[in-house]
Image: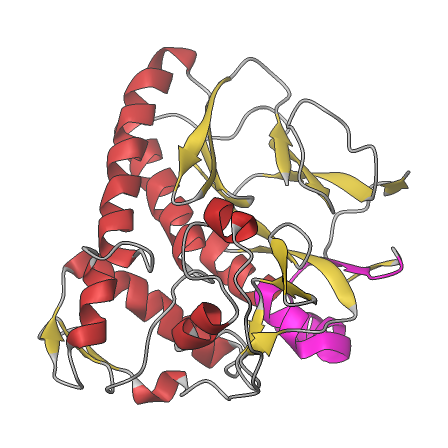
Amino acid sequence: MTTTTLRTTAAADWRALGTGVRLVVTDPALLDSCNLLLARHLAEVDAACSRFRTDSELAALDASLGRPVIVSPLLAEALAVALRAAEATDGAVDPTVGSAMNAIGYDRDFTLVREDDCPVRLTVKRAPGWRTITLDRTTGTVTVPAGVRLDLGATAKAWAADKAAAMLADVAGCGVLVSLGGDTAVAGEPPAGGWNIRVQDVTGSVDETPAHGTYATIGLRSGGLATSGTSARNWRRSGHELHHIVDPRTGLPVRSPWRTVSVAAATCADANAASTASLVKGAGAERWLTRLGLPARLVAQDGTVVTTPGWPTSPAVAA
């Protein structure tokens, strides 16, 4: 997913949380200060939620052995978002897939995963399930059963984008767009005509039209937009083509009729939960999204594009 605007804005692009970061503001004079605040925010999120850092709060839960652990308000909020997403998607997005992610080789930053050639053994094993996690927001404690490892990768970046966009718009008093790996949240007064966001099937530069795959440009004035797919983060091990979207029912990379699903919602977190769940739900995803009233664009493995009611009409282009 890439972003362009209709009038003068200022943008910064860099990397954090193992993914690309894009910040756009409608007041160019405020870009540097907003970028510093965003960097600080993402550093705090990483320290709380990273599955790859041995010193993160999330990693510390692995040693809790089922005992209640007091966590920071930031991690408590991130866990609440993950558990809410699990409930809203009937468990299709589940934070207890940490062990499954490790088993398929996604146990470090993705750039290192792709360079590794260690063999993996694929075994069908259902995730423990989000209902095994107890979060008490009153006491600020979380209880994770012994042996259960959490992965907030399906929700944390989108939630962090929501939180950052709202915070920066409030502090700066201008329009703000924050995109983390394509999970995009906007807040404040948008540019004239809204934020123009290109939804596409392949990862690419914001300044270049995709040479392959379908794409469409839509306008977004509030809320969030997210695209989930099986082709952006994939690797090969032991003769298996693997990717990062795990089906909690099997603990294995999902086999979906969709190669990408894009969803617009009131928040980026809601959009991302729905787009990820749609890959897991497969053929029933279009009906599920329609029933929820979520505008979406689903691209089948053969390139066929299906949209749900409310998705902006714009020409899709395929090369």
What residue lies at 41% left-to-right and 86% top-to-bottom? 129
Q: Position of residue 82 (x, y in %)?
A: 38, 69
In the picture shown, does residue 303 fall above or below 16?
below
Q: Position of residue 34 (x, y in %)?
A: 32, 25
Residue 297 is a magenta residue: yes
Q: Position of residue 302 (x, y in %)?
A: 89, 60
Say whether residue 237 is visible: yes
Q: Is 62 or 178 nearer to us in this picture?
A: 62
On-image quarter of the N terminus: top right
What residue lies at 33% left-to-right and 17% top-to-bottom? 32
Q: Could you say which quadrant of the image residue 260 lies in?
A: bottom right
Q: Is residue 105 left or right of residue 208?
A: left
What residue lies at 56% left-to-right and 72% top-to-bottom? 246
Q: Position of residue 237 (x, y in %)?
A: 62, 63
Which stretch did the figure color magenta?
A: 276-302
Residue 299 is a magenta residue: yes
What residue lies at 34% left-to-right and 72% top-to-bottom? 150
Q: Is 257 or 116 nearer to us in this picture?
A: 116
In the picture shown, does residue 290 fall above or below 208?
below
Q: Is residue 70 left or right of residue 269?
A: left
On-image quarter of the C terminus: top right
Colour approach in the figure = secondary structure
Tell me how many marks there are: 0
The secondary structure that most of the magenta stretch takes on is helix
Q: Is 102 or 177 nearer to us in this picture?
A: 102
Say whether residue 296 is visible: no
Q: Is residue 256 left or right of residue 106?
A: right
In the picture shown, does residue 178 fall above or below 153?
above
